[in-house]
Image (cartoon, helix red, strand yellow):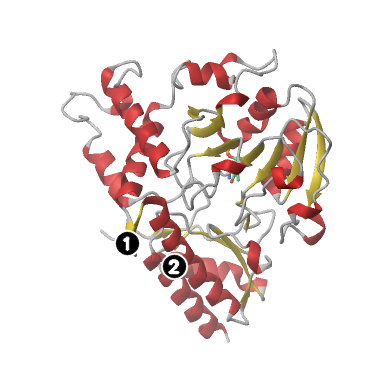
Amino acid sequence: MTRPYNFSAGPAILPEEVLQQAASEMLDWHGSGMGVMEMSHRGKEFISIYQQTEADLRELLAVPAHFKILFMQGGGLAENAIVPLNLSRGVSADFVVTGSWSQKSQKEARRYCSVNIAASNEADGHTSLPEPAQWKLSAKPSYVHICSNETIHGVEFHELPDLKALGCDAPLVIDFSSHVASRPVDWSRVGLAFGGAQKNLGPAGVTLVVVREDLLGHALPACPSAFDYKIVADNQSMYNTPPTYSIYIAGLTFAWLKRQTENGLTGIAAMEQRNLAKARLLYGAIDSSAFYFNKVAPHCRSRMNVPFFLRDESRNDAFLAGAASHGLLQLKGHKSVGGMRASIYNAMPIEGVQALVAYMREFERTQS
Ligand code: PMP
């Protein structure tokens, strides 16, 4: 059976090999007589799954030894509260607003500390990135938050800001939910990274947090124990019952990522090459057409989430219906932005983007 191409922004497409392996192991994981959903998180079977998952992620993302990897719950939105509860010390934090997700983050943080907006691209409709040299960082923020890939507006930091070079000692917090594992991370610039799994890593339900060790142990008294990074780290993410099945599928995805090769590269470096090729193809098709357009400044365009518009919006429904009949699913743009959005995460093969581009050209031809 050939499956349609799924361009959902998340929960999103997973590698078919991962789904097939999960299906084959559903009733009996490795001769244990149990499915993964039925296992105790304290048993040797799940502990081995967990340890392999963590080790594979550390290797794939080249996470340095002085960072802890945590698998939590609550998604990106819970992290918007958990980060200030752990890092703000009740004082203040700086935010760079570049789209809906960083906007939500700064609003939530205000419940726990004071917030300074160091820069915002609101004036241009979230279609560019404010230059770090222009940011108005406060004197002593407890951390500086950015969303390194704005899933809705389709703007991505192609280089993380170097806060030290800007004269700021505070740790950088990145919400990398929608581009984690699509490209390498420069950990020398990061204090904490968080992301929900349901785009590039696996199913919804598990949230990845990668945090520098020296940032642990400063939670506010009001922070729930299950959300205190130090307690989570000290208990290898098993202070409470972790989302075991989601962690297992993420583990299968990491193993899949490790097997990927492209132009002599492997793992994340291979994925980055493929993601670049997919993004070039799709943006190229949009830019070379008078029928479609994208509003984001070219150097800030996301490789993962590509919002685009038909110049004649009255044809949107026909475009989407035709796409679905060509096996191209979930292309409707986010309601706050309108138009279309193609999310082209790691698991989307280049053939999916080729099929989308071919359909876009065909649709344009039949309409003019
Ligand atoms: N941050 C970003 C960048 C996202 O794309 C999303 C979800 N689309 C979230 C945060 C919120 O994640 P969740 O729904 O898992 O809380």
Q: Nearer the viewer, residue 113 or 330?
A: 113
The percent position of residue 292, horizontal first and vertical second, equals 61, 75
Quarter of the image where the C terminus is located: bottom right
- Work out whether mark 2 precedes mark 1 in sequence or the reverse, and give the earlier one: 1
Disc 2 or disc 1, which is closer to the eye? 1
Q: How many marks?
A: 2
Residue 289 x %, y %: 59, 81
Binning the other alpha carbons within 10 Å of mark 1 as few (below 14), some (14 to 19) or many (20 upward) gives few
The residue that appears at 33% across and 47% down in the rendered structure is 258
**Considering the numbered disc 2 on the image, is that residue within a helix, a strand or a loop?**
helix
Quarter-of-image position of residue 25: top left
Dot 2, how many residues are within 10 Å of its Cα: few (below 14), some (14-19), or many (20+)? many
Q: Which residue is labeled 1 in the image?
A: 264
Relative to 98, 14 lies left or right: left
Confirm or reject: label 2 Cβ below 8 Å from ligand 1. Answer: no
Above or below, 8 relative to 208 = below
Compare residues 25 and 98 and report the one nearer the observer. Answer: 98
Dot 1 falls on a residue whose secondary structure is loop
- The amino acid type of the residue labelled 1 equals Gly
Q: Kindly identify the amino acid type of the residue bearing the numbered disc 2.
A: Val
The N terminus, quarter of image = bottom left
Rendered location of residue 59, percent (x, y): 39, 40
For disc 1, does the CB lie below 8 Å from ligand 1?
Answer: no
* Residue 191 point in image, percent of width and height: 61, 35
Ligand 1: give its quadrant.
Answer: top right
**Distance from label 2 to label 1 (Cα)?**
22 Å
Marking on residue 353: 2
